[in-house]
Image (spheres, rainbow, N blue to C red):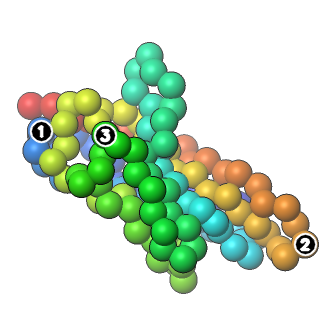
């Protein structure tokens, strides 16, 4: 089994910054990709950013230039640096990882428990 543990959420004023972390643990051979999603009240979950094991990244248009995703492959950890936060960024942020537990196993999708980010004055 694999567990994803997120940290770093909280309350921040508009224009402020936060950094989210997500550490994967358990039976892990490889993780590719790792990603952050978010879900605001009354809305569907949406992709915020993703990163491959080689460092290729993708971002939602709404966060380009403000958010940066990165990962530490040795620690099986993904980060999301969020700058210039807006009230519209308020949501529960979920870590996502496509994990292969051995070379012979098909990859399995895992989710973290979610961490609340609230942007408000």
Which residue corresponds to mark 2?
A: 104
Q: Position of residue 3 (x, y in %)?
A: 64, 58
CB contact under 8 Å: marks 3 and 1? no
Q: Is residue 82 left or right of residue 121?
A: right
**Residue 19 visible, this orientation:** no
Q: Secondary structure at mark 1?
A: loop
Mark 1 Cα shell of 10 Å, populated few (<14), some (14-19), many (≥20): some
Which residue corresponds to mark 1?
A: 14
Which label was assigned to residue 39? none
Q: Position of residue 18 (x, y in %)?
A: 24, 53
Q: Residue at x 64, y 66 (%)?
A: 32
Q: Position of residue 5 (x, y in %)?
A: 52, 56
Q: Of the two numbered discs 3 and 2 on the same chain, state the one appearing first in sequence.
A: 3
Q: CA distance from mark 3 to mark 1?
A: 15 Å
Question: Which residue occupies the extreme top position in the image?
Answer: 42
Mark 3 Cα shell of 10 Å, populated few (<14), some (14-19), many (≥20): few
Is the C terminus in the top left, top right, bottom left or bottom right quadrant?
top left
Between circles 3 and 2, the one closer to the viewer is 3
Which residue corresponds to mark 3?
A: 62
- State the image quarter where residue 15 is shown: top left
Q: Nearer the viewer, residue 7 or 30?
A: 30
């Amino acid at each position: 089994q694999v567990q994803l543990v997120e940290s770093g959420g909280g309350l921040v004023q508009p224009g402020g910054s936060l950094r989210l972390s997500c550490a994967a643990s358990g039976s892990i051979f490889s993780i590719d990709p790792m990603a952050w999603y978010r879900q605001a009240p009354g809305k569907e979950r949406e992709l915020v950013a993703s990163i491959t094991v080689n460092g290729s990244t993708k971002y939602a248009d709404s966060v380009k230039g403000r958010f940066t995703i990165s990962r530490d492959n040795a620690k099986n950890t993904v980060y999301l640096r969020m700058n210039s936060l807006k009230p519209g960024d308020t949501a529960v942020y979920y870590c996502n990882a496509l994990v292969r537990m051995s070379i012979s196993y098909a990859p399995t999708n895992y989710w973290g428990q979610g961490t609340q980010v609230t942007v408000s004055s």
